[in-house]
Every structure is written in C-alpha cells, then in structure tokens.
Amino acid sequence: METQKWIDEGYNIIIEFAPKLLAAILIWIIGLWIISLLLKGIRKAMNKANYDESLKKFLSNLLNWTFKIVLVVIVLGTVGIETASFAAVIAAAGLAIGLALQGSLGNFAGGVLIMIFKPFKIGDFIEAQGESGTVKEIEIFTTKLTTPDNKEVILPNGSLSNGNIINYSTEDMRRVDITFGVGYDSGIKQTKEVIMSVIERHPLILKEPSPAIHVSELADSSINFFTRVWAKTPDYWAVKFDLIEQTKEALDAAGIDIPYPHTVEIQKQG
C-alpha cells in the first residue's frame, strides 16, 4: 500500500508539472531563438553605425547575458518557482556591484560616449586632461596616448568624456602663428618684405588662405610683427620651426636687428 501511495503521488506530480515543464522547455528554445535574432539585428545596426569593434563585442556580450538572465527568470516562473525573491537577490547583487564599481562604470559610460560620438579616433593628436599625444588605443575604460617624446599616457574615459578635448587632427589645415620682434631702428616695410620673402620660398606654406604680416605691438624694446601662415596639418611643426629659423637668418642677412637683453659691465676706476 505504501509503495502504491508513492506511485500515485509521483504520477500526480508528473501530471501536474509535465505541462509546465514542457512549456518551460518550449519557452527556453523559442527564447534562445529570439535572443539570437535580436543580437544579429543589434550587431547589424552597430555595423551600419560604424561602432568601434571593441564596443560592438562588449555590448553584444552584455546584451546576450542580460537577455539570457531575463529568459531564465521567465522559465523558472513558468515551472512554478517563486521568482520574486530570485529577482530581489539579483537586484541587490547588481546594486552592490554597481556601488563597488562606480568609478569603473563611469569610465565604461565615458568609453561608450567616446565610441559613439567620436570626438577623436586612433591616430589623432589631441590635448585633454592636461596631457597631449597621439591616440594609440581607445578601450572600454581607458584611452591610451603616445606623447611626442614616446611616453604612454593612460586617461580614464569618464573624466576624458566630461572634460575639454582639443583635437589637432580633425581639420586638414592649421594656422601657424609666430611673432617676430625687431629693433626700433628697423623699417617696417623692409621687415615685412624680408619675412614675406621667407614665406614665399617655403614649399610647405599654403598660398590660400593667404599669409598675413601685421605690426601687433610697439613693445618696450621691439616692434613686434604678428605673422600668420597656413599649412597642412601634418606639416605644422616643420613649417613652424623652419619659419623661425629661416626668418632669423634672413633678418640677419638684411641687417635688421633683433633686440635682446644686454649686460653692461661698469668698471670702477681706482
């Protein structure tokens, strides 16, 4: 009799839970199929939006696990397992992890914003957070720069995305601004002609926009000439350094004085 009782109870349990179990299995299979379709659609949308490869992988994995956790909760609820407490545990764990990783989550959000809005790309020369260099890598949490003297600088994406960024590589051309000071005995017209002759001979200085030379200041010991030329962005530093050096040589050759502090020795007569 006891054995028959157990058999009857087992039979009743099977009869009661079999439909729920079959429904749960069906939901699990259909759910995985729907998740697969959703992820394919999301990846296709990210490819069209030209998202960074690292961002695409990270978001795909994040969404995959999120969808599957939701699916597990639905399947457990279908079987008849109480999911309210289970969801509460997940929420509490998520809150704890979020508080512990608050800074990292901020950096992650900053990385996502950088990859979406693209204020710079790999290879650009930027200035941000008191640092400047060529962008080497854009990762989820940090951005790596290589400085002109070949040092690596790692910037957190959170502060980087919230601060000012100067991108020197965005435009095709850059303006080179240099001020030359000459003595008061020098002629303004002659000085302009000497500086302009250097500009016109330089092969990397663009004709348009046209160069400009103006008297910008009558300083204590010099007449200052503000000189403005344009160059292609990759040629910026070559033009700047060449213009300073070649103008100095041209002014010397023309006998135009560049004033500098003098030290006068006074000899005591005994």
Image (cartoon, rainbow, N blue to C red):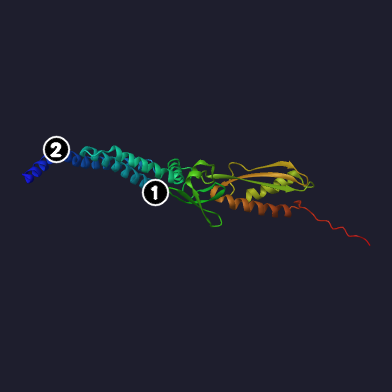
Instruction: Look at 66% across and 52% down and name the residue there.
Output: 244
Q: Is residue 40 visible?
A: no
Q: Position of residue 112 (x, y in %)?
A: 42, 43
Label 2 crowd bin: few (<14), some (14–19), many (20+), radius 10 Å: few
Q: Position of residue 85 (x, y in %)?
A: 30, 39
Q: Are marks 2 and 1 in contact (CB under 8 Å)?
A: no
What quarter of the picture does the C terminus occupy?
bottom right
Residue 16 is marked as 2
Q: As drawn, is 128 to the left or to the right of 66?
A: right
The numbered mark, 2 or 1, whose residue comes first in the sequence reads 2
Q: For the point 11% across and 43% down, which residue is it?
A: 10
Q: Secondary structure at mark 1?
A: helix
**Which element is circle 2 on?**
helix
**Residue 48 position by quadrant:** top left
Hey, which residue is sitting farthest front in the picture?
1
**Residue 70, x across and y down, in percent:** 29, 40
23 vs 173, nearest the viewer: 23
Residues 102 and 142: in front is: 102
Using a 10 Å C-alpha cutoff, classify the residue at mark 1 as few (fewer than 14 neighbours), some (14 to 19) or many (20 or more). few
Q: Quadrant of residue 215?
A: top right
Q: Residue furthest bottom?
A: 270
Which residue is more in the foreground, 203 or 132? 132
Camera-near label (2 vs 1) is 2
Residue located beneath label 1 in the image: 54
167 sits left or right of 8 in the view: right
Cα separation, mark 2 vs mark 1, equals 48 Å
Amino acid type of the residue tagged 1 in the rendering: Ser
With respect to residue 269, does 1 lie above or below?
A: above
Is residue 203 left or right of 105 when viewed as pictured?
right
Residue 151 location, x and y as percent? 53, 57
Q: Amino acid at mark 2?
A: Glu
Q: Which mark is residue 193?
A: none
